[in-house]
Image (cartoon, rainbow, N blue to C red):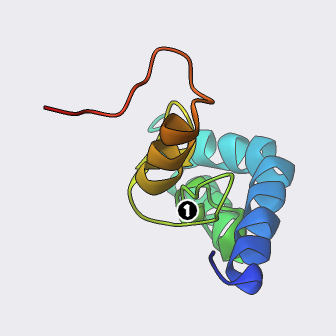
Amino acid sequence: MAKLSAINKNNKRIKMSEKFSEKRKKLKKIVMDKKLSLEERFKAQQKLSKLPRNSAKNRIMNRCQITGRPHGVYRKLKISRIALRQLGLEGKIPGMVKSSW
């Protein structure tokens, strides 16, 4: 089980990312537009840098929904490899059986 503070910090980042996503998208569009003047683009870049760092999408960590483990997480399932194996052994995942030879 991961530290509760790390899980809460990541959840806070997710909420903040959703809150500022539209604003970030608009500012990035202005910054990347070559037709606008350099001064306008620079102002947009400054506004973008004033936004909280945790509102950036790439600061979010993929964590297991069950244990909160940050590594070895399957993106589709949002479960770590260890939790997936445990659920498979318990028979809670249809079609998944323990390997034996």
Relative image position of residue 59 (x, y in whole percent): 56, 65
Q: Position of residue 22 (x, y in %)?
A: 78, 41
At 80% from the left edge and 53% from the top edge, which residue is drawn? 20
Q: Is residue 56 visible?
A: yes
Q: Amino acid at mark 1?
A: Met
> Dividing the image into 4 quarters, which one contains the C terminus?
top left
In this view, 91 is above or below 62: above
Q: Is residue 51 visible?
A: no
Horizontal relation, residue 83 to residue 98: left or right: right
SS type, badge 1: loop
Looking at the picture, does residue 20 appear above or below residue 53? above
Residue plotted at (68% across, 84% down) = 3
Quadrant, the N terminus: bottom right
- Outermost residue, left direction? 101
In the image, 47: left or right of 72? right
Query: Residue under circle 1?
Result: 61
Does residue 64 sit above or below 2 in this rendering?
above
Looking at the image, residue 70 sits to the left or right of residue 25; the answer is: left
Q: What count of labels does the image hold?
A: 1
100 vs 84: above or below: above
Q: Residue at x 72, y 72 (%)?
A: 7
Residue situated in front as seen by the camera: 20 or 92: 92
Q: Quadrant of residue 30?
A: top right
- Outermost front residue: 101
Residue 66 x/y as whole percent: 68, 54
